[in-house]
């Protein structure tokens, strides 16, 4: 397994999270298609029609995925095509210098996909869809997204044996306390249908979403799975297209490690919004004096963010119908002198509860004759 690390972003907010889109100018791509190639690059595409002029062959998987994504209603793109070197590369972030008798040896070569994600994970994409990636590269990408709790790998396979392989990998590697799964796999016997790309495109148009409610997309066709095979897919936390009362819908809503997909997304979404609000509050101050007034403003800013998330539906309601979200902080007099001299406030705490969806309904059906 490759060594993964937390990829840092410039921020004055340090989040210790406990669990109980690529850019070009002002454009952000919510979905990145990851593929191996000769060298690292990012290209934003706004339709499949423009791809041949950008050097992408129409007879390739990446072209087919993009075309399928733009068939999704309300998906406007752009799509980022993230190409990484298929050969190991030197990462300056992982550089080591080993002295030798006649100089030094520069080490720390990493896989191309690791270098790509180190460079672009914070560009803004939420969904990463593998296209033509090797198993080792998929594992590397899955490990990095999981370690950083950022971005979601949306994989696709065409048989249950491969689904079993990825389930076993996720349930072995994505099991840390206070982290949620970031790796899901869709299964379709016909690999010419690009259901993973379409599901990611649809998800990018929503905030609050139960993945088992994604359906009736142009390439969603129910396979002829037997019931025992569907049970196996469900037990392996895979996602298949099934016929639900005439609608072609995804069968489940779980990451490969068993976590609910919406919980994984909402946890990242909520954390990102709160961090952004607090950072913008800091940015708006010429000088943030270490006093109770500013501590109270921090609390108010976080509370307002929580209320906004509650309105969006990504925070649960308590028994009184209010946001199940609380913010606590200690006054300046309770802060140690060391923290004050270090200009670091470590006593802002946020507790939030994520919502749950109704996914199955059991009906007591009495019939009189």
Image: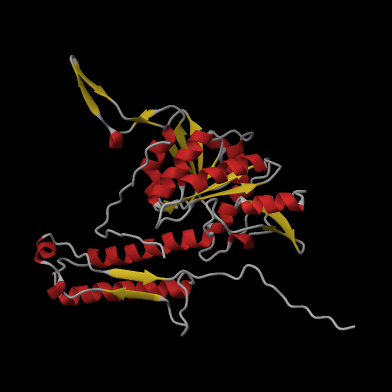
**Viewport quadrant of the N terminus:** top left
Query: What colour scheme has been applied to the protein in the rendered image?
Result: secondary structure
**Viewport quadrant of the C terminus:** bottom right
Q: Which residue is drawn at 12% across and 67% down?
A: 336
Query: Where is residue 249 drawn, in percent x and y?
Result: 68, 58
Residue 343 visible here: yes
Residue 124 or residue 169, whichever sits in front: 169
Image side of residue 307 versus residue 56, left or right: left
Rendered view: 131 above or below 253: above
Q: Which residue is drawn at 62% across and 55% down?
A: 72
Residue 24 visible here: no
Image side of residue 332 versus residue 61, left or right: left
Q: Residue at x 62, y 40 (%)?
A: 162
Q: Quadrant of residue 156?
A: top right
Rendered view: 74 above or below 38: below
Q: Which residue is drawn at 28% across and 63% down?
A: 279
Query: Where is residue 297 drawn, in percent x and y?
Result: 24, 75
Image side of residue 121 versus residue 234, left or right: left
Query: Where is residue 11 drawn, in percent x and y?
Result: 27, 56
Q: Residue furthest right?
A: 369
Residue 295 or residue 260, whichever sits in front: 260
Image side of residue 6 versus residue 175, left or right: left
Rendered view: 117 above or below 349: above
Q: Which residue lies furthest to the bottom in this view?
A: 320
Residue 71 or residue 183, whichever sits in front: 183
Looking at the image, how many numbered discs can be counted on the residues?
A: 0
């Amino acid at each position: 397994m490759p060594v993964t690390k937390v990829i840092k972003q410039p921020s004055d907010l340090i989040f210790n999270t406990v669990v109980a889109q690529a850019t070009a100018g002002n454009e952000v791509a919510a979905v990145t298609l990851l593929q191996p190639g000769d060298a690292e690059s990012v290209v934003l595409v706004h339709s499949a029609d423009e791809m041949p002029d950008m050097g992408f062959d129409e007879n390739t998987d990446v072209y087919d995925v993009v075309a399928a994504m733009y068939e999704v209603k309300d998906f406007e793109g752009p799509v980022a095509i993230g190409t990484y070197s298929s050969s190991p590369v030197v990462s300056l972030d992982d550089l080591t210098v080993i002295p030798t008798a006649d100089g030094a040896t520069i080490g720390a070569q990493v896989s191309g996909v690791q270098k790509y994600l180190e460079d672009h994970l914070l560009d803004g994409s939420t969904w990463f869809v593998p296209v033509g990636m090797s198993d080792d590269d998929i594992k590397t990408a899955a490990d990095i997204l999981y370690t950083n709790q950022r971005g979601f790998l949306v994989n696709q396979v065409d048989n249950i044996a491969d689904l079993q392989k990825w389930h076993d990998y996720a349930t072995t590697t994505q099991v840390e306390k206070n982290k949620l799964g970031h790796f899901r796999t869709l299964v379709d016997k016909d690999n010419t249908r690009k259901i993973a790309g379409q599901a990611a495109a649809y998800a990018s148009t929503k905030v609050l979403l139960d993945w088992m409610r994604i359906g009736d997309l142009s390439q969603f066709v129910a396979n002829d799975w037997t019931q025992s095979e569907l049970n196996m897919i469900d037990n392996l936390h895979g996602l298949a297209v099934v016929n639900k009362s005439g609608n072609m819908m995804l069968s489940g809503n779980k990451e490969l490690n068993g976590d609910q997909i919406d919980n994984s997304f909402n946890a990242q979404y909520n954390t990102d919004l709160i961090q952004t609000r607090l950072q913008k509050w800091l940015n708006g101050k010429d000088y943030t004096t270490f006093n109770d007034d500013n501590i109270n403003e921090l609390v108010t800013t976080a509370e307002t963010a929580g209320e906004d998330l509650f309105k969006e539906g990504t925070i649960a309601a308590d028994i009184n119908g209010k946001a199940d979200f609380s913010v606590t902080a200690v006054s300046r007099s309770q802060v140690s002198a060391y923290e004050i001299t270090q200009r670091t406030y470590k006593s802002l705490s946020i507790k939030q509860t994520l919502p749950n969806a109704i996914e199955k309904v059991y009906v007591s059906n009495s019939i009189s004759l």
